Image: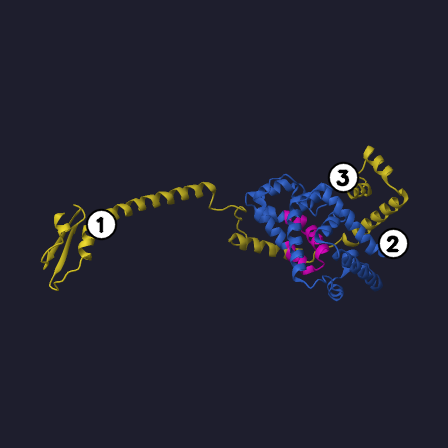
């Protein structure tokens, strides 16, 4: 459903035809005033066209030259060389997917090896407890020998009169 | 719609040139620029009333067109698509200027100094000094009146009255409905009639 403004504009521009035109003209409360307004609008249109229509650009060649320079600058190529297709980029969707998948695979592999190394090289709870124990003898020393390949850790304790019973039991 | 194409250029339709541009042919884009630069510049000038700004905005518009021509699917004519870019660039610029400006967008002193209306309305060689002055005054009145319109209303009235564009083409260029175009045209005409009646009745 067109509003009055829309119908009036279409009427001025001669875009109303047939039944629509008859109905619109019949709905006008003051047809003479509307006709006058139509004439005014048409005069205004012709006046604007006459006054604003012929506007020329000075130095068109320089405009062209400047535009070409800007395009070349944007495209990152030298003047005269064929321009890369606009909007084209190295990061196509396919490449993005492949790059994402490869990054994920590298991450998973690295995580796997790091986790495995941590398990192999991790300190046993027993060692942590011994090192955390208080030793009265200042001459006491403790040496640790570890072989990761065989998953063996030897704790060599000198100068301790005794080990706490819970460690000795283990 | 007239174009500035020479007979040799006119043999190549816009659509073919667009396809060449999409393959990276900058020479084809040069031809399109040659066809539409004056119309684009004139349209922008009528909206912003300043040569230098119109020049810069026309450059921006064509640059944007080049950058996005790969996405142009040919659902409308090239010039309608181009006008859409022109309108986006110009209306955006006018809005920013309104926000930054002091509110008085039009300045008589500046306009009279910057505009040489005789050069746009009649050939310079034929214009007598008093004719130039009269044309200058008329042009100034028109510019003042157009400056009172919102950017959207300016665009609609100029595309309709100067460019002879159809409602659907204007709607496409401004990304709005045909009803909106007609409604804006109604109010823009009313406002310009009120402001310019004494001028166009006496010319």
**Looking at the image, is B85 positioned above or below residue B74?**
below
**Residue lying farthest top?**
A19
Labels 1, 2: front one: 1
Q: Quadrant of the N terminus of chain A?
A: top right
Residue B155 counted in the magenta span: no
Using the image, tell me which numbered label, if any, was put on residue A121: 1
Which label's residue is closer to the chain start, 1 or 3? 3
In the rendered image of the structure, the colour used to display chain A is yellow
State the residue at coordinates (85%, 54%): B197
State yes or no: discs 1 and 2 in contact (Cβ < 8 Å): no
Q: Which picture quadrant has residue A28?
A: top right
The local secondary structure at tag 3 comes to loop
With B105 as the anchor, is A147 left or right in this view?
left
Tell me how many marks there are. Answer: 3
Q: Is residue B33 magenta?
A: yes
- Chain B: what color? blue
Question: In the rendering, at what x and y percent does residue B68 appear?
Answer: 58, 47
Mark 2 burial class by Cα count in 10 Å: few <14, some 14-19, many 20+ = few
Query: Which residue in the rendered view is the most extreme toward the front?
Result: A165
User: Which of the labelled discs sits on residue B201, or is there none?
Assistant: 2
């Amino acid at each position: 459903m067109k509003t009055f403004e829309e119908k009036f504009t279409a009427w001025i521009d001669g875009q109303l035809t047939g039944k629509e035109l008859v109905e619109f003209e019949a709905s006008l409360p003051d047809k003479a005033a509307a006709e006058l307004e139509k004439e005014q609008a048409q005069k205004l249109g012709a006046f604007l066209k006459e006054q604003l229509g012929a506007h020329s650009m000075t130095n068109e060649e320089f405009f062209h030259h400047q535009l070409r320079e800007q395009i070349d600058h944007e495209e990152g190529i030298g003047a005269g060389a064929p321009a890369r297709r606009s909007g084209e980029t190295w990061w196509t969707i396919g490449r993005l997917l492949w790059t994402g998948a490869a990054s994920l695979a590298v991450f998973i592999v690295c995580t796997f090896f790091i986790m495995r190394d941590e398990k192999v090289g991790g300190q046993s709870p027993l060692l942590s407890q011994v090192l955390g124990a208080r030793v009265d003898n200042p001459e006491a020393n403790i040496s640790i020998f570890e072989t990761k390949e065989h998953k063996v850790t030897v704790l060599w304790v000198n100068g301790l009169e005794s080990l706490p019973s819970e460690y000795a039991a283990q | 719609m007239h174009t500035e194409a020479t007979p040799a250029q006119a043999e190549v339709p816009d659509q073919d040139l667009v396809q060449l541009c999409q393959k990276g042919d900058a020479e084809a884009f040069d031809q399109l620029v040659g066809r539409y630069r004056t119309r684009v510049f004139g349209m922008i000038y009528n909206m912003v009333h300043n040569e230098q700004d119109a020049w810069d905005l026309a450059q921006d518009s064509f640059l944007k067109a080049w950058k996005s021509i790969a996405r142009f699917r040919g659902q409308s004519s090239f010039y309608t698509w181009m006008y859409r870019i022109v309108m986006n660039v110009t209306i955006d610029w006018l809005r920013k200027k309104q926000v930054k400006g002091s509110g008085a967008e039009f300045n008589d002193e500046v306009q009279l100094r910057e505009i040489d209306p005789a050069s746009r309305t009649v050939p310079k060689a034929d214009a007598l000094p008093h004719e130039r002055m009269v044309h200058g005054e008329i042009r100034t009145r028109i510019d003042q009146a157009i400056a009172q319109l919102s950017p959207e209303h300016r665009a609609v009235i100029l595309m309709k009255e100067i460019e002879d564009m159809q409602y659907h083409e204007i709607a496409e260029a401004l990304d709005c409905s045909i009803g909106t175009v007609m409604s804006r045209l109604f109010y823009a005409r009313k406002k310009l009639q009120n402001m310019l009646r004494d001028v166009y009745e006496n010319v």
